[in-house]
Amino acid sequence: MGVHPMWDQYPQIKQDLAKVIELIDAHVKVRDPQIEKTVKDFIHSGGKMLRPTYSLLCSEIGPDQNKERSIAMAASLECLHMATLIHDDVIDEADLRHGMPTIHTKYGNRYAIYAGDYLFCLCFNILSKHISSFNQLEFNVRGMEKILTGELEQLNSRYQPPTSVKNYLSRISGKTAQLFSLSCYSGALISKASPQVSNRAKMMGHYIGMAFQIMDDILDYEGERDKLGKPVLNDIRQGIYNLPLIYAVKENPSSFMEILSKKEDLDEEDMNRLTDLILQHKGIEKAKALATKYTQKALKELDRLPEGDYKGTLKEITTKLLRRTI
């Protein structure tokens, strides 16, 4: 499978993403043929590749634009993202990814963890061949640390009472928003944008990531399994309580806690009851409102970036993400 068809209307992005996939594929060399096949299959599984897209677009911000360098940075970021996805699937015991069986489901946890670890290594292997400053490497290391911290926070929060919006936002800031922030910042940095402009791109990426994860969590309630490529309401089944539920619980804690106390023993009747309660207490509506605010903040930061053709594309893609029309 090649580049996701969502990029058909953006020919230059599609062409660049094809080069990103090609570069990653060319670097995959594992003695174990099963691991190599597993990694290559995952690379070509048809992900949307949003993070490398933002990195590529932001690499047009500064005055020193180099396509080869931009492709390499995007490839390293996609390796990092894929590594976190594989590990996340193991932790969440997820059966599907992009509508296909997850690696640990097909080959077991050991193969999955090794494949994820290999992609972490591949991220820095590609990055080291195209790095131009220690600051870039340092930011990527610190960025990865924050991403892993966010994953750990999510693991530790499983089945904890869903009462704190602040804790939720802290969790997704590390788990999701950090990689969007890292992508935008790295793109601007390698194009030699000024520190002020690069930091503005970083903040834009943070806001985009926050809005993206909130909307992704909303889709756990509103989406269809065939379209999402994963079971609907899977987060609640795994004890991961996201924003629509948290907002609703704050309105009437007692009606939720009796059901949630069952933890992993929730049945379909419980899930239907939870969904009804969340709708009744406007949990989804409130979560969408917050996602809209984060998107508006992202667009405000975008407006302050230097002029260029990239800005129109960034604005269009970011707006479509909020509406989930991309």
Image: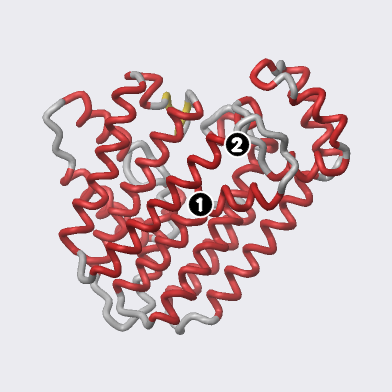
Percent across and percent down for residue 189 are 34, 73
Q: Secondary structure at mark 1?
A: helix
**Horizontal relation, residue 48 to residue 246: left or right:** left
Residue depicted at x 28% and y 41%: 119
The amino acid beneath tag 2 is Ser
- Mark carried by residue 100: none
How far apart, in angstroms, are the residues tagged by discs 2 and 1? 14 Å
What percent of the width, then of the height, locates residue 180?
46, 58
Q: Quadrant of residue 148?
A: top left
Residue 37: quarter of image: top left
Does the CB distance between marks 2 and 1 fall below 8 Å? no
Tell me where residue 229 appears, x and y as whole percent: 51, 32
Q: Is residue 160 above or below residue 205?
A: above
Relative side of 161 to 97, left or right? right
At 35% across and 56% down in the image, what residue appears? 14
Q: Quadrant of the N terminus?
A: top left
Classify 197 as above or below 279: below
Compared to residue 311, the image places residue 292 above or below, namely above
> Which of these two is toward me, 306 or 261?
261
Precedes in sequence: disc 2 or disc 1: 2
**Horizontal placement of 318 versus 134: left or right?**
right
Picture residue at 60% right of the left edge, 50% below the top: 324
Closer to the camera in the image, 122 or 215: 122
| Residue position for label 2 | 157
Give the label on residue 174, or none: 1
- Which residue is pictured at 41% across the width and 26% down the height? 102
At mark 2, the secondary structure is loop
Q: Amino acid at mark 1?
A: Gly
Q: Residues within 10 Å of mark 1 (few under 14, many from 20)?
A: many
Q: Which is more toward the observer, 55 or 141?
A: 141
The colour scheme of the drawn protein is secondary structure
